[in-house]
């Protein structure tokens, strides 16, 4: 049945466990370090995260049960469809078969609710009734507002000022789900007030918004902080994407030659690829490719170091590919891919030689996005267009080589709230940005005094 366009799973076929790649890594993941240079202990994280999620963060159990109440909420839109991009294949004239997992069908429009629902649940059962977080472009703030509404929790989102002003519809979505969305910097926190005193017209930054959300959390009762990517437990919750894809591919007797995902903090890429990397560790022959913007080349250019996850340096040191926590990416439209670091697990998997990384300029990505919209219909998020552009590169290579390659990628979200980027592209106003070696050297110098991760 390889000619099928959409492959569905029944609701009773939804995976009931998440896959933890930490159980299968050839070398263990270097631990996060505290300010004293020693591995962080769970009690140090307790003011910020609930203990049940801290345990998950550190777990090396291979399979972790998805709690029934979480499954019940995921069933609102999951299992997500696996689709074949027949019209795109035809337009490219490729012998390759291109499959994609459509994560744009979630209420918030991306893969992010997969972890938002799980995180809201674990906080709720731990007795927490309020979550704080930050959001850049607004996808994560929407996902967490939606998830909190399902469990009767309060959610406060610090949204980077410039996005708050430019993207009113994301803010309105958060409010529709009962979330509270504040422009950051705000008058609500000491950090925010200090920055506003210095510069009342600041556009804000993700690093500032993280600092505000953490300050708000540690100063409030019954409140914890929530992060939408990068951390081990977030990547774990996303593996339901790849586990579903494996069942769906099996139904049509297909197995991918290459698995592709775009990489911001690394969570949707990990979600589709980690179950396949498990196969690879056990001898399967396939390629796994993470795709990032050339303007923010974490995996393809940045060194593997210990660095902070936020600009203000409040988080523990994480072993990861990082452009330096003070790095300010150029204003490309894929806001969700403008992050200075990369998930420690994804960085480690690259070091282990279990994946490849590619970097693509935004204009090639928009060309791919528009070709996609005009063949397959759905308008992708600018982040997602990076995975599409790589899938197209692979399909063209298959054509040159005359090979029937099977390509699978994660369609991480729709772009219906991101049309300003399409406007800029269609009017010919977009630029490609290259990061010079000199600029990178400057930004990574902020990590030079930190401990070095052990070599393999
Ligand atoms: C947030 C986001 C991303 C990037 O985040 P990851 O953690 O790397 O997955 C990619 N695509 C969409 C649609 C997003 O909203």
Image (spheres, rainbow, N blue to C red):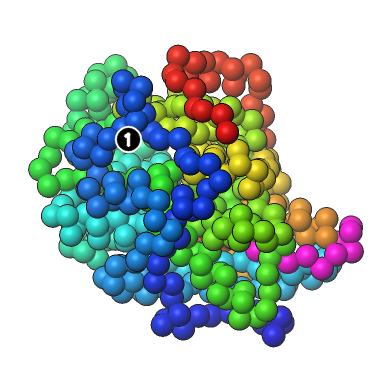
**Total marks in image:** 1
How many residues crowd mark 1 within 10 Å: few (<14), some (14–19), many (20+)?
A: many
Q: Quadrant of residue 358?
A: top right
**Residue 299 at what x, y percent from top left?**
60, 37
Residue 316 vs residue 218, the one in the foreground? 316
Q: Which residue is mark 1?
A: 210
Can residue 235 be seen? yes
The answer to if 361 sits in the magenta stretch is no
Q: Is residue 26 left or right of 110 when viewed as pictured?
A: right
**Residue 231 at what x, y percent from top left?**
40, 44
Q: Under tag 1, what secondary structure?
A: helix
Q: Which residues are magenta?
A: 399-408
At x 31% / y 22%, what residue is drawn?
35
Q: Is residue 218 left or right of 245 when viewed as pictured?
A: left
Q: Is residue 101 above or below residue 197?
A: below
**Residue 221 at what x, y percent from top left?**
10, 43
Q: Quadrant of residue 111?
A: bottom left
Q: Is residue 2 left or right of 411 when viewed as pictured?
A: right
Q: Is residue 201 above or below residue 363?
A: above
At x 36% / y 70%, what residue is drawn?
74
**Residue 18 at what x, y percent from top left?**
42, 63
Disc 1 residue: CB within 8 Å of ligand 1: no
At x 57% / y 70%, what residue is drawn?
246
Can residue 6 be seen? no
Quadrant of the image containing the N terminus: bottom right
Q: Is residue 3 above or below residue 170?
A: below
At x 54% / y 61%, what residue is drawn?
275
Quadrant of the image containing the C terminus: top right
């Amino acid at each position: 049945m390889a000619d099928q366009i959409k492959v569905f799973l029944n609701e009773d076929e939804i995976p009931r466990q998440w896959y933890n790649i930490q159980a299968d890594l050839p070398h263990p993941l270097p631990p996060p370090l505290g300010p004293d240079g020693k591995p962080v202990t769970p009690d140090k994280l307790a003011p910020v995260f609930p203990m049940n999620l801290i345990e998950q963060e550190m777990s090396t159990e291979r399979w972790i049960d998805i709690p029934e109440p979480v499954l019940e909420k995921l069933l609102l839109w999951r299992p997500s469809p696996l689709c074949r991009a027949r019209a795109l294949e035809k337009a490219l004239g490729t012998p390759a078969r291109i499959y994609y997992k459509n994560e744009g069908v979630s209420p918030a429009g991306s893969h992010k609710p997969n972890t938002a629902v799980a995180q809201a649940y674990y906080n709720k059962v731990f007795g927490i009734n309020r979550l704080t977080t930050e959001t850049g472009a607004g996808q994560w703030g929407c996902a967490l507002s939606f998830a909190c509404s399902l469990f009767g929790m309060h959610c406060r989102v610090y949204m980077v000022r410039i996005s708050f002003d430019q993207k009113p519809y994301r803010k309105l979505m958060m409010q529709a789900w009962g979330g509270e969305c504040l422009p950051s910097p705000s008058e609500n926190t000491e950090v925010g007030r200090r920055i506003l005193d210095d510069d009342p017209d600041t556009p804000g930054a993700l690093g500032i918004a993280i600092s505000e959300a953490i300050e708000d959390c540690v100063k409030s009762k019954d409140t914890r902080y929530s992060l939408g990517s990068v951390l081990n437990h977030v990547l774990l919750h996303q593996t339901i994407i790849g586990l579903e894809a494996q069942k769906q591919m099996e139904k049509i007797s297909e197995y991918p030659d290459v698995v592709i995902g775009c990489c911001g903090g690394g969570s949707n890429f990990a979600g589709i690829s980690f179950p396949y990397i498990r196969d690879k560790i056990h001898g399967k022959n396939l390629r796994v490719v993470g795709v990032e913007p050339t303007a923010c080349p974490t995996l393809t250019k940045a060194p593997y170091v210990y660095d902070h996850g936020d600009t203000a340096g409040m988080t523990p040191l994480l072993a990861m590919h990082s452009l330096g926590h003070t790095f300010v990416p150029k204003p490309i439209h894929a806001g969700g891919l403008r992050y200075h670091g990369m998930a420690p697990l994804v960085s480690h998997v690259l070091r282990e030689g279990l994946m490849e990384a590619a970097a693509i300029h935004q204009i090639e990505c928009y060309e791919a996005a528009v070709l996609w919209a005009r063949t397959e219909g759905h308008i992708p998020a600018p982040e997602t267009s990076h995975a599409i552009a790589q899938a197209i590169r692979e399909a063209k290579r298959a054509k040159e080589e005359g090979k029937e390659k099977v390509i699978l990628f994660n369609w991480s979200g729709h772009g219906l709230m991101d049309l300003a980027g399409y406007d800029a592209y269609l009017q010919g106003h977009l630029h490609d940005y290259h990061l010079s070696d000199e600029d990178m050297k400057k930004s990574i110098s902020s990590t030079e005094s930190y401990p070095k991760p052990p070599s393999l």
